[in-house]
Image (cartoon, helix red, strand yellow):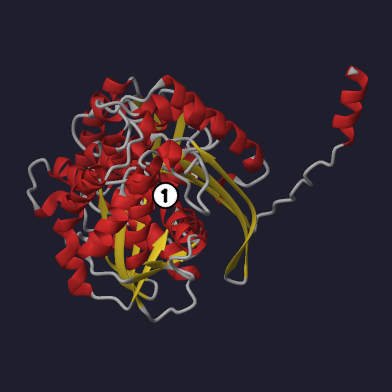
């Protein structure tokens, strides 16, 4: 019998291996309800999906009242990411982007979990802010939309949050992320499975209270077409079509009939919704309550549903990062303009920082696009806090960059950028760097040293460096060699380097120069 089973297993058809080249991209969406993976090939401005995976993890449901994650849900999440890693193994690292949303934003002790999650996935994971999530959702919907000129209201009901975006064409004019999602609301009002009208009334009211503060600003934008996306919206549309309450969209009268159907069932165990899978039912009631609140507050009568959402927006953003369309560069330029940064000076600092990076990146093990790009952005923005006050301007700048709405930046990357700004002068803020994820601590300190030296060498502001500087790095030793007599002709720089030698001792680094 054992032999027969083995023969049967070996003769079963195997899924063909997909050959993935540099034109293939992958997006991993660690949502509050489900984890998604999509792999697509990019050709002539369009994506063709070649593989998809979805696993129900219910990350938000695993958070207690103090936002600690249960061991059971953590293991479920890590198992899912390990499975995803097999499909990502043959892709170039720079063609992969994994993003976490509301549940990971709320998670207490997220750095420890993220380190385990990144080991399981085999790739770094970015926790993105709510408004950045909204931007990516709109980007995906607009790129896949047939009409590029229409005004749209795009809504995504997730497990832990709801994103609302108003825009026209490819441009999002107004975007918000609200702390109300189908998993959270279902857990709050329908955790025992009871589906009474009274429960729904309370859930709808809670959703309206979360949504009401942003209604006016979206009504002022206006729209011609309301579009819903992601799992909740698709399940509602399927329920209406299969139930005979709509032909191809979500209609307001259909929502009322769906609510009556749920109340009549009385309990989740007795609820049968045509077209909706059993794994979606535990969060169905919360999603329905949010959707009813949205239709009422925005006076929506009919909403089409898109298969496109966050992960497709991530794919297009990835392509932009490998071209001249990196939205992060746009965000940095906007900050430079908004805070009247001296661009000529910051360009000189950036050039010197990049020169130092090229000389020591390999020996210091920081040759990664994340560190190279963040060093350049921090050199551009190192004086962004000057408009607030010269005293402690590096601290003002760090606060701005840690808390600003910067399109394209994950929260981790903003914190890294803020740490570099905070540490570019005077006493080295060791605790700021050690609060970063452990994998970033050592390389971030080394990148900060390069920024500090570049800023120091351009303290005179009025001219270029005017000499060749050779930098060498070996572990905890950083050496600078200048052309003959240059230091004696620049006594202030020499004095600054002596002070820098003292400050860098706090991170165990020996600075020498000759």
Q: Residue furthest bottom?
A: 149
Q: Is residue 264 visible?
A: yes
Crowd around label 1: few <14 · some 14–19 · many ≥20 (10 Å) = some
Q: Is residue 9 left or right of residue 96?
A: right
Secondary structure under badge 1? helix
Identify the residue shown where x is 43% and y is 65%. 245
State the residue in front, 461 or 403: 403
Instruction: Please state the horizontal and vertical placement of residue 45, each as a whole percent of the image.
Output: 57, 71
Instruction: Please state the horizontal and vertical placement of residue 338, each as a whole percent of the image.
Output: 18, 63
On screen, 105 above or below 510?
below
- Quadrant containing the N terminus in the rendered view: top right
Q: Report how many numbered discs are placed on residues in the image.
A: 1
State the residue in front, 295 or 53: 295
Instruction: Please state the horizontal and vertical placement of residue 364, each as a whole percent of the image.
Output: 48, 32
Q: Is residue 450 left or right of residue 117?
A: left
- Quadrant containing the C terminus in the rendered view: top left
On screen, 7 above or below 45?
above
Residue highlighted by disc 1:
373
Instruction: Please state the horizontal and vertical placement of residue 15, each as a whole percent of the image.
Output: 77, 44
Identify the residue shown where x is 34% and y is 52%. 288
State the residue in front, 203 or 334: 203
Q: Is residue 452 visible?
A: no
State the residue in front, 90 or 321: 90
């Amino acid at each position: 019998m054992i032999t027969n089973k083995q023969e049967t297993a070996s003769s079963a058809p195997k899924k063909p291996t997909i050959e993935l080249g540099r034109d293939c991209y992958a997006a991993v969406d660690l949502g509050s309800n489900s984890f998604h993976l999509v792999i697509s090939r990019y050709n002539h401005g369009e994506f063709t999906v070649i593989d998809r995976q979805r696993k129900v993890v219910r990350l938000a449901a695993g958070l207690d009242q103090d936002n600690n994650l249960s061991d059971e849900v953590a293991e479920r999440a890590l198992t899912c990411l390990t499975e995803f890693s097999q499909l990502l193994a043959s892709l170039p690292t720079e063609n992969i982007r994994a993003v976490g949303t509301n549940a990971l934003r709320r998670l207490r002790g997220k750095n420890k979990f993220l380190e385990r999650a990144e080991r399981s996935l085999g790739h770094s994971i970015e926790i993105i802010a709510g408004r950045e999530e909204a931007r990516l959702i709109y980007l995906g919907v607009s790129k896949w939309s047939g009409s590029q000129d229409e005004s749209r209201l795009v809504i995504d009901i997730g497990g832990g949050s709801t994103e609302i975006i108003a825009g026209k064409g490819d441009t999002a004019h107004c975007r918000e992320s609200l702390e109300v999602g189908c998993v959270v609301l279902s857990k709050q009002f329908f955790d025992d499975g009871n589906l009474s009208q009274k429960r729904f009334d309370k859930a709808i009211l809670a959703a309206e209270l979360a949504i009401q503060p942003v209604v006016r600003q979206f009504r002022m934008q206006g729209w011609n077409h309301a579009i819903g996306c992601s799992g909740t919206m698709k399940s509602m549309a399927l329920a209406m079509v299969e139930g005979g309450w709509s032909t191809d969209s979500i209609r307001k009268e259909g929502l009322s009939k769906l609510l009556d159907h749920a109340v009549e069932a009385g309990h989740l165990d007795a609820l049968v919704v045509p077209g909706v899978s059993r794994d979606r039912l535990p969060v169905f009631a919360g999603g329905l309550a949010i959707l009813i609140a949205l239709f009422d507050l925005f006076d929506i009568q009919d909403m089409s549903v898109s298969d496109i959402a966050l992960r497709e927006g991530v794919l297009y953003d990835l392509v932009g990062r490998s071209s001249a369309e990196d939205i992060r560069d746009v965000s940095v330029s906007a900050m430079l303009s908004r805070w009247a940064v001296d661009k000529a000076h910051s360009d000189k600092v950036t050039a010197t920082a990049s020169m130092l990076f090229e000389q020591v990146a390999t020996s210091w093990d920081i040759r990664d696009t994340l560190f190279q790009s963040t060093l350049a952005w921090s050199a551009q923005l190192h004086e962004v806090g000057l408009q607030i006050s010269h005293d402690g301007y590096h601290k003002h700048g760090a606060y701005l960059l840690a808390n600003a709405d910067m399109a394209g930046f994950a929260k981790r990357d903003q914190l890294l950028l803020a740490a570099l700004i905070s540490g570019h002068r005077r006493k080295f803020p060791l605790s700021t760097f050690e609060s970063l994820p452990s994998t970033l601590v050592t390389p971030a300190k080394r990148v900060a040293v390069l920024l500090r030296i570049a800023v120091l060498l351009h303290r005179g502001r009025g001219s270029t460096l005017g000499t060749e500087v050779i930098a060498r790095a070996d572990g905890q030793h950083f050496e600078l060699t200048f052309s003959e007599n240059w230091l004696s002709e620049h006594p202030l720089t020499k004095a600054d380097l002596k002070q820098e030698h003292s400050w860098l001792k706090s991170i165990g680094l020996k600075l020498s120069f000759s």
